[in-house]
Image (spheres, grey):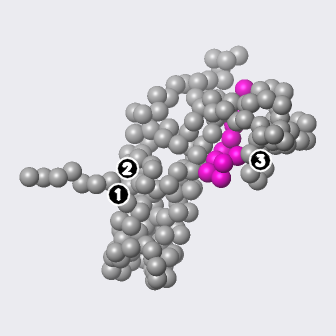
Amino acid sequence: MSSTPPLLTMLEAVNIMLSVIGEAPVNTLEGAATNDVIQATSILNEISREVQSMGWHFNTEREYPLVPDVNQEIILASNMVRVDADAYPEFDVVQRGSKLYDKKSHSFKFDRTLKAEIIFLLGFEEIPQIARQYITIRAARIFQDRIVGSEVIHGFGEDDERKAYADLKEAEGDTGDPTIFDHYDAARPLIR
């Protein structure tokens, strides 16, 4: 009887990274960790932030309501990595620290709820398996480059990374339902 393999966990991802440099796996990421475990975990988090900041179907919310508080300020959640509220020509909003700022009025004050496209940074185990796989492979290559620096291992890792990225992009196309209007350069001639 075969069982379904579980989704990749953060512990498994770190152990994959450790295996690339010839280190033994660990049983936990908690407590007294070695320098290699600490560095692998840090790089895994760094690459997860980098990849997710690009914005994917799984971590992007459209028409997300941003509600001003009692001080008429819009406080952004700590896991919001990009905010785009282009639907309001009267505002030119940007993220400044943990608040939304209007560059036109030079103010943090908003008198109404705005709807925006938000890219959220999610925990490693909240993202789809295909994204976990790509992030792990990319992080393992970078970890190896920083710790060992082997050109041979780098080449193998680079090939794996390219394949994992292509798989992620294919999954994005399958789940994201993109249209020509999602890319301004492609849609510009039609919008005129």
Q: How far is the residue under mark 2 from the one under mark 1?
A: 7 Å
Type of the residue with mark 2: Gln
Residue at screen point 57% across, 50% down: 121
Which sits in the foreground, 16 or 120? 120
Name the N-terminal-most of marks 3 and 1: 1
Q: Find the distance from the CA under tag 3 to the CA under tag 2.
A: 32 Å
Can residue 106 be seen at all in this image of the molecule? yes
- Label 3, secondary structure: give it: strand
Q: Is label 3 or label 1 in front?
A: 3
Q: Determine whether label 3 and label 2 are within 8 Å by CB.
A: no
Magenta residues (range): 76-87
Q: Earlier in the sequence, mark 2 or mark 1?
A: 1
Q: Residue at x 66, y 45 (%)?
A: 82
Q: CA distance from mark 3 to mark 1?
A: 34 Å
Q: Quadrant of the C terminus?
A: top right
Q: Establish if 48 lies above or below 101.
A: below
Q: State the residue position of label 1.
A: 8
Residue 180 appears left or right of 116: left
**What's the amino acid at mark 1?**
Leu
Where residue 122 sits in the image (x, y, percent)? 52, 51
Above or below: residue 172 compared with residue 112: below
Residue ranking furthest to the left? 1
Residue 156 in sight: no
Query: Hey, which quadrant is residue 181 in on the image?
Result: top right
Q: Which residue is mark 2?
A: 129
Q: Which mark is on residue 99?
A: 3
Q: Residue at x 50, y 38 (%)?
A: 57
Look at label 3 and name its amino acid. Answer: Lys
State the residue lying farthest toward the right: 105
Q: How many marks?
A: 3
Q: Residue furthest front?
A: 70
